[in-house]
Structure formats: C-alpha cells, structure tokens
Amino acid sequence: MANYGGKQCNMGMGSLASPSARYKRKFRWMFGVISQNVFGEPAEGVRALPPTKGSRPSLEFKDIEVQHVTEDIYLPGKPSWKPINITLYDMYDKNCWPSNPVWDWIKQCYDPETGEFFAILDNKVNGYGFKKDCWLKLFSGCGDVMESWVFENAYPSQVNWGDLDMSSSEVLTIELTLRYDRASLCPWCHSPYMRQELKRSFDKI
C-alpha cells in the first residue's frame, strides 16, 4: 500500500493489496469421509489412510439448444458434477491387518470372495450405507478453516492400488475416483457445531 497525500492507494492491485487478503495454498487441506475411517482425520492412527493428492469439485451445466430465427442460443440445463480423484498413502498397521479401510468400504457394496453384490441403499454399517458424505477443508497457515466443501453421497467408482517397481524407493499409494451426487460450499462447516459433528462421526467407527 502506497501513501499519496495522506491517503492509502493499492496501486491498482485491487484486493491483492488488502491487508486482510490471504492466498489459499494447494498443500493446506484435508479430505475425509463422514462415518467411514478411510482417510482424513485418523480415528485409529495409521488405519486412516492420509491423502497426498486431491481436488475441489468440478461442475458443468448441460446445454439446452434453442433454435431462434437465424441463430442458435443456449440455456443452462441440468448441472452435472464431475468425479474427483484422490490419492492416498497406502500404510500398514499390524494391529489392524488384514483390514484395509478402502477394501472395507468396497465390501459394503461388493464382496469378490463370495460374489455377493449388496443393495446400495439397504446395506448399512453403523447406520451408514455404501454412499457416504465427504468433506474437504482448506486451511490457513495458522490452521484456521478458509474454505469447506461437503460432497453428498460419494462412493469409489474406481480404485487403483498402483504398480510395483524394484528400482523405485517411492512409497505406495492408492488412487480413488469418487463419484458424488452434488457438492456444496458450506460456511456452516466452520462452526464449532459442525466440527463436533464431524468428530462424532469418526468416533462411531
């Protein structure tokens, strides 16, 4: 902020020069599944697989084409929420082996050992079904929540446990593609009540 004639001027930078403005950083975030200890805030140590890569939601409106005399005009049609990709660290805990949080989630819908495919809406564990609500939080450098999203009725449409390589020293990860019904930017997620509800959902596991 420059000072001219006793008045402050932001030198044409707009809100970028505001003392209250803060950049949102790509590495300050957490993603979790409400009611399912899959990733995010761990309820049982490394049993929760922490995320390393993620994304915010993506929305597209389908076009409605209208023929109008000599031109085509378009109107917004149905909104379509695009799947998001999440990459998790694949960690081992001897106290929980052979259980795997991602595998446990899949088996709520499909059990390859028996060939069973369960009813999506009826098969519930601890009152929660295969499709689950998820949350995404972005944090400031001081740990304050700057942005919160809720993904409604999400489920893993694709799971990739990754390749192996004798010449690599990298840790293993699991890649998930999550399909969801809709997402909402939620100011109320910042409230103490919502934080308590999120914690309570993990404590059920």
Image (spheres, rainbow, N blue to C red):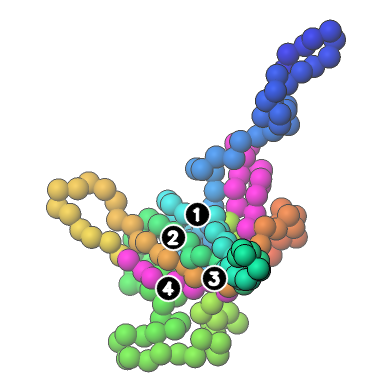
Q: Amino acid at mark 1?
A: Ser
Q: Assign a secondary structure to mark 3.
A: loop
Q: Residues within 10 Å of mark 3 (few under 14, many from 20)?
A: many
- The residue most toward the front is 70
Q: Assign a secondary structure to mark 4.
A: strand
Residue at horizontal 22%, vertical 46%? 169
Q: Earlier in the sequence, mark 2 or mark 3?
A: 2
Check contact, mark 2 vs mark 4: CB within 8 A: no
Q: Nearer the viewer, residue 11 or 134?
A: 11
Instruction: Identify whether 173 is placed above or below 152.
Output: above
Q: CA distance from mark 4 to mark 1?
A: 16 Å
Q: CA distance from mark 2 to mark 3?
A: 12 Å
- Rendered location of residue 28, percent (x, y): 54, 43
Q: Which residue is mark 3?
A: 180
Q: Which residue is mark 4?
A: 157
Residue at horizontal 57%, vertical 61%? 59
Q: Earlier in the sequence, mark 1 or mark 3?
A: 1
Residue 34 visible in the snapshot: no
Q: Amino acid at mark 4?
A: Ser
Image disc number at residue 55: 1
Q: CA distance from mark 4 to mark 3?
A: 9 Å
- Rendered location of residue 104, percent (x, y): 42, 75
Q: Which residues are magenta?
A: 137-160
Q: Is residue 151 magenta?
A: yes
Q: Earlier in the sequence, mark 4 or mark 1?
A: 1
